[in-house]
Image (cartoon, coloured by chain):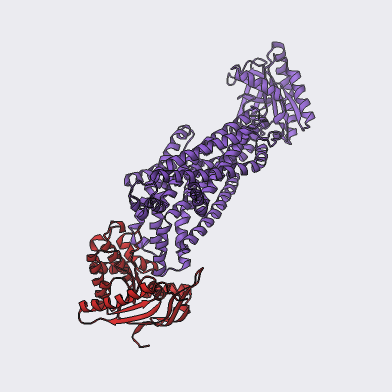
Amino acid sequence: MTKKSIVKLTEVTKIYEGKVMHRALNRLDFEVEKGEFVAVMGPSGSGKTTLLNLISTIDLPTYGRLLINNVEPETLSQNKLALFRRRTLGFVFQDINLLQMLTVEENLVLPLTIDGLPVREMEKRVASLAKQLDLATILHRRPDELSGGQAQRTAIGRALIHQPKIILADEPTGNLDSKSARDVLELLKAINQREGTTVIMVTHDPIAASFCDRVLFIKDGEFFNEIYKDEQRQTFFQRILNVLSLLGGNVHDLSSVRLP
Amino acid sequence: MTFRQFAYRNVVRNRRIYAAFFMASVFSVTVFFLYSMLLFHPSIENRFVQEIAVMGMGAAEIILFIFTLFFLFYSMRAFLHARSKEFGILLHLGMEKRQLQRLIFIETMFIGFASIAAGTFIGYVFSKFFFMIVREIVLLPALPLYLSWEPFALTIGAFLSLFMIISIVAPVFIRTGEAADLIRGEAKRRGLYGFSKTRGYMGLLFLGLSYGMAASTSNSVVIGLLFFLPPLVTIGTFYFFTDSLPLLLQFIRNRKRLYWRYFRMLSISEGSVRLRENARMFFIVTIVSTVAFMSVGILASLTSFASQYREMHPLGLAYKSMPENELERQHIAQLVGELNTAPIDYSLVRFQPLQQTSSFSGQPITMLKITNINMLARSFGYEPIELAEGEALFLPPSPSSYEALDTRKVMTLLEESRVTVDIQGAYPYQLFPSYVMGQNTIVLNKLDYDKVKDWSLKNNGELFTYYAFNVPDWQRTKDIGKSIDKSLAESFLAGKEDALPYAFDNPGMSYSVIRTTFSLLLFIGLLLAMVFFLAAGSFIYFRLYTSLDQDRKQFDVLRRMGITDKEFKKIVNRQLIPQFFFPWGVAFMHSSFAFLSLQVIWDALAEISIVKELVLVLVGFTLMQIVYFYLIRWRYLAHIKGAR
C-alpha cells in the first residue's frame, strides 16, 4: 500500500445471504489514490453499488480487507462508523434525495447541524459554496421548485459542505439532461482539482466516465479491466466505449452463467 | 384467480397496513354495538335516570357514526393515495376504470364485513361486562344478558351502509389522471408550507382571549361566557393548528441559532409538514378530548360537591307541613316506617316555628325553641347551648352568613306577644338546609318561646311544622319517601307547586340522581374518547405509511450522512411524540382554563379531590397513548429500516 492511497480493497468478497445466496463481489482488489477522480463502470448487477456501499461503510465485506483513509471500518462500532461517515465521506445520489421539507440552504447545512457547528461558521460555508455552485439566487427555494441540475448541484453542495476526504457519487447524472449532466461533471472535476478531494463515481454513462482520471470496469463482482485517461478526452471516451462493448457483449452472452 | 379473489388477496396480503385501520373500525363497531345493546335492553323502563342513559347512548351513537364516517373517509383517502402506484400499474395493464372502482369497492366491503363481524362479536362477548358497569353506575336492578335482533340489526345496518357509502365514494379519491402519473405518483407535498399569518395571529389571539376571560371570570358574566367561550375556543383551536403553529415554527426556523442545532432542523421541519397534513385531525382530537376531560373533571368535582352538598343539606330527610295538611300523620308514619324497615339509623325532631313582628326592624321574624335545637344538635354530636330567659340567638340562614350575624347585638320587642328579647350573636352550627327556616330567624329560650306560643295558639298564628330527620348515613335514603316525592313531582309538573300543603326534601335521592347522571355521561364520554384516540392513532399511522417510500429514502440519505440508529430513533421520536401528545396537551390546557371559570359557578371547589381524579384519568389515557405510540413507532421503524 502506497502512502498516497486513500481507499484500498484487498481480496474483498461480499456475499448477501437470504433466500437466494448471492455473491455480489468476488475477491476484488482495488485502490484509489488521494486526489484521484475514479469512475466505476459495469453492467447492471456487476456489483458497482455494492462496492460503493462498502466504501460508504454502510455495508461490511464478508471476507477481505478494506481500508478507508487508513481506517478499517470493521473495527469500528456502529456509532464510530456513523461519526466516521459524517466527517470523512460525502454522498451524491442518482435520484438526488434532497430532503423535501428543507430549503436549499437548509439542505446544504444539514450535515453541519448534525455535527453541531457554530451558526456563523455554517453561514460562512454556505456563502462560499453558494458562490462556487451558483446557488446564491435559489437558497430559499424548496427542492420541488428546482430544476434537475439545480437540485443535483444542491446535493453536491450538501456532500461538500463538511469538507469530506472522499466523495462517493452513485450515478449523479442519471436523471439529468445532457446540459445539466455536463455542468455537474465539470463541477465535480473542478472540485477534484481545486480541493484535491477524492471522487469515486459509479456510472453507466461513458461520457461521464470520460471526465475521470481512471475507469475501473467490473463484471459479476470481479475485476475486469482498468484504463487511465490520456491527453484527449475524445480518445479516452473511445477507449472506454471499446472496453464497454467487450464487457456488454460478454455479459449479454453469459447472462445465464452465474457464479454459484 | 377471479376478480373477487384478487380483491380478497389484496386485502389479506396488505394486512399489515390495514391492521390499524381495521383495529379502529372494529373498536368503533364494538362500542356502537354496546351502546345499542343498552338502548334496546328490555328491562330498562322509562325512569328519569334511564331516560338520560338512553338519550346519552343515543347521542353517543350518532356522534360515533358521524365520526366513524369521517375517519373512514380520511383513512380511505390516505390509503388509496398510498397505493396509487399499484393502481397505476393496474390501469397500465389495461384494467378499466370501472373495474378499478369495483376492485376498491369489493376490497372496502371485505374490510367492512370483517370489522362488522368482529366488532359485533367482541361487543356481544363484552356486553355482560358492560352491563355490569352500567348497572353499578346507574344503580339499576340486574341487567341480564339478552339476545334480540334489534342491536344487531342497528349495528350491522348502520355500519354496512357506512362502508357502502365509503366504498362508493372512495374511488373518487384516485386521481383521474394518466396511469403514468399514478405510477410516478410520489406524494406531492406542495401547498403544505403555506399558511395565513392573519389567521395564525387570530388563532393565538382567540385562544389568549378566551384563556384570559376564563381565568378572570366573575359571577355576573359567567353565564354569558358559557355561550361565548366555547365557539371562540373552537375556532381558536382550529386556527391554532392550521396556522398559528406553522407560524410559530416559522418563527423558530428564522432563528438560525435555534433552528440550526443538531437534529432540531430535521425534526422541526418534518414535524411541521406532518402537522400541516394532520391539522384537522389534531383539531378534532383536541376538541373531543377537551370535552372528555371536562366531563371527567365535572364528575371529579362532584365528589367534592358531595361534601358541600352535605353542608347545604345537613339533614337526611326533611318534611314540612302546613297547618291545613291532613296527611301529616300518615306521611310521618310512612317515613318512620320505611326508615325502620330499611333499617337506617335516624333521629327525628319536630319543630314548630312561630312568627312575630320585630319592633326593631318592623319585619316578620321566625322563632325556634332552643330545646328542640339542642335535641337535633345532640344527634349531630354538637354541644347543647343554654339560653337564659330574655336571651336569644340569630339562626344563620346559610353557613356564609354566620360571621356577620355573630357580632350583631339587637334588643327587640316581639310586638304581638309583647315579649322582649336580647339577641346576642348567632347559633354556631348549621343544622338546617339553607333558608328553610326563613331569612330572619332567632332561637328563643323555652319560657319565652312558650309565651309566644300561647299567643299564637290563641290567635291561630301557627306557621308550619317541620320534621327534621337526622340520618348519618344520608346517601342510603334515596328510596325513602318515594311516594311523597312522586306526589310532589306530579303537582310540580302540573304547574301547581304550592298547591300541596306539605313539602318533602330528600337530599340522598337528589344527590344520587345528579351523581348517576354525571357518572353515566362520563362513562359514555370515556368510551367515545377511547374510540377517538384509537382512531387518531391509526390515522397517524396511515399518514406515516403514505410517506413511507419517501421516508425510507430519507433514512438512507441520513444513514450515509452518518446518523446512528440511536440518533435516528431520536429524530423519529421527536417527530412522533408531538403528533401523539400535542393535541392532547392542548386539550388539557383548554379544560384547565375551563375549570378556572367553572369554579366561579362551583364556588368553593375542593381542588385536591379533582386533582386526584383528573390525574387518574390522565394517567390512564397517557398510558394508553404511550403504549400506542411505542407500538406505532416500532412498526414504523421496522418498515423504514427493513425491506429496502
Q: Quadrant of residue B236?
A: top left
Give the answer, above or below, for where B179 lies relative to B298: below
Residue A149 in the image: x percent, y percent?
Answer: 26, 63
Closest to the observer: A5 or A102?
A5
Q: Is residue A88 above or below residue B82?
A: below
Q: Is residue B606 visible?
A: no
Residue placed most toward the observer, A160 or B105: B105
Q: Residue A227: image x %, image y %?
A: 29, 81
Q: How many marks?
A: 0
Quarter of the rendering occupied by the C terminus of chain B: bottom left
Q: Residue at x 70, y 36 (%)?
A: B144
Q: Colour of chain B?
A: purple
Instruction: Point out residue B189 in the picture as x, y percentages from the top left corner.
Output: 35, 53
**Residue B558 location in percent, x, y?**
40, 66
Hey, which quadrant is residue A138 in on the image? bottom left
Q: Nearer the viewer, residue B239 or B112?
A: B112
The chain drawn in red is A
Q: Is residue B497 above or below residue B20?
A: above
Indicate left or right for B303 with B338 as reference.
Answer: left
Q: Please identify the quarter of the rendering in which residue A154 is found.
A: bottom left
